[in-house]
Image (cartoon, helix red, strand yellow):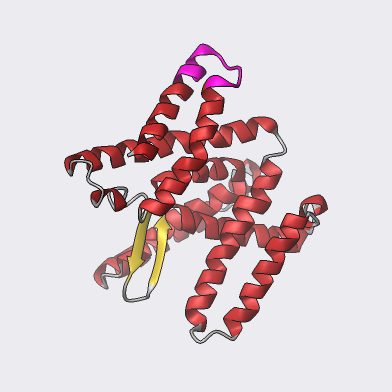
Amino acid sequence: MSDFIQKIDERWIIAAGIFFNLLNIAFIVTENFWGLLIPFGLALVAFIVLALDKVLLFLIFSTPLSISYFNPDLHIGFTLPTEPILFGIMILFFFKLLYQGNFDLKVVRHPLSLAILFNLLWLFFTSISSQIPFVSFKFFLARLWFVTVFFYLLSQMFKKRQNINRFFWLFMVPLCIAALYTIYQHSLYGFTKDSSTWVMFPFFKEHTSYGAVLAMYVPIAFVFAFVLKHNLNRKLSATLLFFILLAAVVL
């Protein structure tokens, strides 16, 4: 990669810099500030291409702390920063699949994988015949990038046992941060039942998804704290996370 960069003529780099600065000026003058996100998009593409494993780890860590965004003009809603990253990884995955064509057939032929593929196919055809195709295809696309990354790509990542444990730690820590935020917000309203349905916003839209994630991770934190053999620091950390999640479930 470094050899490739050295071979690039400096004049092209200077020309690209001038072009990009002019483009930024045009975006600012026309008040089209979305255009200023282009560098971040290009940086994301570079990270996905050069360090996909690290991008996946960041994606796992940022999921519990993602914030919902909705554009009423475009009628499009997504969570930041996770879903744009998921979309980018999905596009790269399909390009790589078309170019190389080598993916673990054991995963593809697994009954669970076949059921998922059948569901995606069914969603695609029913979106065509939908009364509101735009909404249906948005749902299909969102399902597609979640399945592509969190099932197919992570199935390859989880071949290494250490990545499974790393996944749980990277998700539990930010989940506890979101739980502590929710508990604090809940305390401001006297831990009332009515407020318990929305105080987890903006990290979770409402209490059902928040409660479901907590319920899934309490037993995982318990195993990390009291079952698995770790060093003292990890056991103490896991114990702390367990009690935070347990308190969050109760509240």
How many marks do you count on the picture? 0
Residue 108, horizontal then vertical, whole percent: 77, 56
How far across and down, in percent of the image, does residue 168 sit? 55, 35
| Occupied quadrant, residue 53 | top right
Residue found at x 54% / y 40%: 57
Query: At 34% from the left edge and 66% from the top edge, which residue is drawn?
Result: 70
* Residue 124: x %, y % from top left: 63, 76
**Nearer to the camera, 146 or 222:** 222
Task: Say which of 121 and 149 sits in front.
Answer: 121
Viewer-proximal residue among 218 and 149: 218
The quadrant where residue 98 appears: bottom right
Residue 162 in sight here: yes
Q: Is residue 227 magenta?
A: yes
The quadrant in which the C terminus is found is top left
Residue at point 51%, 12% (across, down): 232
Residue 118 lies left or right of residue 182; in this view the side is right
Magenta region, residue range = 226-236
Q: Is residue 118 magenta?
A: no
Left or right of 207: which side holds 233?
Answer: right
Q: Quadrant of residue 184?
A: top left
Q: Is residue 13 visible?
A: no
Q: Give me the residue at 50% from left, 38% from top.
A: 217
**Nearer-the-camera pick, 219 or 161:** 219
Question: In screen coordinates, is 29 left or right of 232?
Answer: left
